[in-house]
Image (spheres, helix red, strand yellow):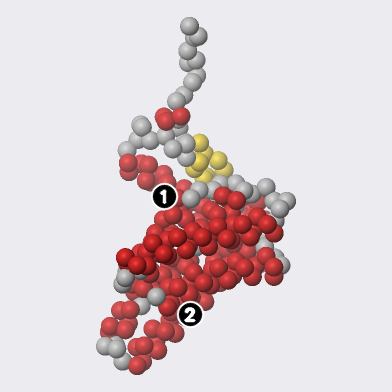
Amino acid sequence: MPEADDNFIEPDVAETAVTQDPVDGVLPISSRGTLDESIFETLKRDVLGINARLKQVVYPHFFLRGQDISHYQNDAGIHCDLWAPLAFIIVYSVSVSRSNARSLFSGLFVSLWAALLIMAVHLRLVKPHEKSSLVSYVSMAGYCLFPLVINSIVGQLILPAVFRIGHGASWAVRTLLILRLLLLTGSVTWSMNSIRIVAKCQSFVEVFPLALCFFGIGWLSVIL
């Protein structure tokens, strides 16, 4: 019989590897070993990983003029996951479809994944020499949905309180519309600036289809 290797570690109980993250110091790369840890620790690890990824892809990219962004561009395509995009799409779909969940949720859920896939295919086609895979582009676009998720939560759950306070007065309707449009503009700008930087998109051909997708997603939260 072959001798057992004392150095062998089963994948399910392997410790989580850690790599250096130029933004926050460390970015955990999960080995998904959960047999020897609690559910809380697993969720905490995943949330910290998502937050570290957001610090690379979304957080610093609203206003970056005059700053060195090379480390964001070089490292953004290395680590990718679909947990955060899945969570963002679910939150977005729930918040936008809360008034008619049965008929809207499934349509929004599928449409958002389709939009992410379209953006990923577009980036893959316009950047054939990049090493990033299609899945990494889907992940990247999914993380850039974060500002639009904030827009959907604020626009669908918080701003309607202004309308209720005004008891349906004309000024309340106008205020609600103006605030929603301002939120839409800010969130789409934030998302576009994020994906433009991390995906290294410069030309009109590269940026315009992405802008259409993000604007369409944001516009749904205004009209539904």
Quarter of the rendering containing residue 61: bottom right
Spatial CA span between label 2 and label 1 = 29 Å
- Residue under the image location 48 percent in, 72 percent down: 218
- Residue under the image location 47 percent in, 12 percent down: 4
Amino acid under disc 1: Val
Check disc 2 and report its element: helix, strand or loop: helix
**Residue 161 seen in the figure:** yes
Q: Is residue 25 above or below residue 3?
A: below
**Residue 140 seen in the figure:** no
Where does label 1 land, which residue?
A: 47
Left or right of residue 16: residue 74: right
107 or 97: nearer the viewer: 107
Counting from the top left corner in percent of width and height, residue 69 is at 65, 59
Counting from the top left corner in percent of width and height, residue 107 is at 41, 64
Q: Is residue 224 above or below residue 90?
A: below
- Residue under the image location 51 percent in, 60 percent down: 114
Pick out the residue farthest to the bottom.
170
Left or right of residue 108: residue 59: right
Check disc 1 and report its element: helix, strand or loop: helix
Counting from the top left corner in percent of width and height, residue 79 is at 56, 46
How many marks can you see? 2
Left or right of residue 43: residue 113: right
Label whose residue precedes the other's in the sequence (2 or 1): 1
Neighbour class for label 2 at 10 Å: few (<14), some, many (≥20)?
few
Counting from the top left corner in percent of width and height, residue 204 is at 69, 70
Amino acid under disc 2: Leu
Where does label 2 land, which residue?
A: 182
| Residue 210, label in figure | none
- Residue under the image location 50 percent in, 36 percent down: 17
Circles 2, 1 touching at the beta carbon (< 8 Å)? no
28 or 199: nearer the viewer: 199
